[in-house]
Amino acid sequence: MSSGTEQFQAQINGLAATKEELIPLAFSGFAHFTAMQVRNRKVKGLDLHLARLQAASAAFYGRALSDEVLKSYIKTAINAGPEDQSLMVTVFSRHGEFTAQSMDVEPAVLVRTALPSDGPQGPLRLSAVAHERPLANIKHVGEAGKTFYLHEAIRQGFDDAVFVDRQGRLSEATIWNIVFWDGETVIWPIAEMLTGTMMGIVRRQLERLGVPQRHEEITIARLSEIKGAAVMNSWTPAMPVKAIASTLIPEARSFINLLHKAYEAEPAYSL
């Protein structure tokens, strides 16, 4: 299914996937993944992607593939495609999701590639939704809630949605981490959430740049104190947020630029 520099590929364990191999995956919910942007055949935060896959595989299947094996599959896909592309690595069990055999087995790896993406245009208006993702610390498949609440937000005139947990804390957006600014310090919310790879990149580079950071519980009531907000994922280190629910938030261009500067400081890895 791939030759030359095709933009759309699907490989399982480094080999072109057949239709017969892909059909069962359409019904599989017992899998986890990571998504990345490839530029000039290089990836930023590769160590974070590998650590995510290792931890999730250990939790789901009782074992994990080595970094060397995972990197070989990623490299094969990158080299078979164009210099710039989107790439998703999904780890799954060939034994399915409803059998005891799906645990404590060596998982398989699906690597898919597509056109590169920089995400939607901002700034975004977010609705606030009472929701807590199951297994929030794992980036797993089959989460209908995220898409449902995104669609609900759009129907209500918003661009996307941010989740509020049972304690009233803002945690994460549908497919984004969220971050705040008080005019001097970058504020990461305290709540159960997925620690994104972009979040990991930005945090360590802000630390290297000497930018103050702290973790706090952020509630809807506290939003009036906020001087800026942004969401981030593999597409972008900073998409400005201009409103959450009925609270307007300053765009804080210096804050957005700072997050982009942190991402640009991260070295890109060539496999």
Image: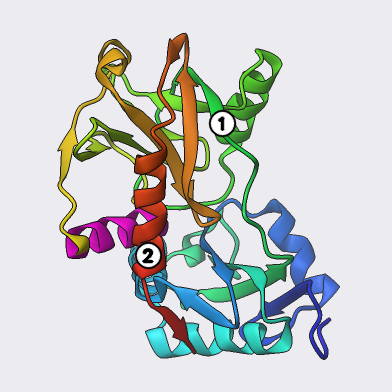
Kindly tell me whether residue 171 is visible in this rendering: no
> Identity of the amino acid at label 2?
Arg
Q: Position of residue 31 (x, y in %)?
A: 53, 59
Residue displayed at 67% across by 25% down:
151
Task: Choose top left, top right, bottom left or bottom right for residue 37.
Answer: bottom right
Residue displayed at 53% across by 81% down:
42
Which numbered dot is residue 52? 2
Q: Badge 2, how many Cα within 10 Å: few under 14, some, many 20+?
A: many
Which numbered dot is residue 185? none
Q: Position of residue 107 (x, y in %)?
A: 50, 74
Magenta-span inclusion, residue 44: no
Badge 2 or badge 1: first in the primary sequence: 2
Task: Choose top left, top right, bottom left or bottom right for residue 160.
Answer: top right
Which numbered dot is residue 145? 1
Mark 2 and mark 1: span between their CA atoms?
22 Å
Residue stretch rendered in magenta on the structure: 196-208
Element type at marker 1?
helix
As drawn, the residue found furthest toward the front would be: 254
Q: How many marks?
A: 2
Residue displayed at 65% across by 12% down:
156
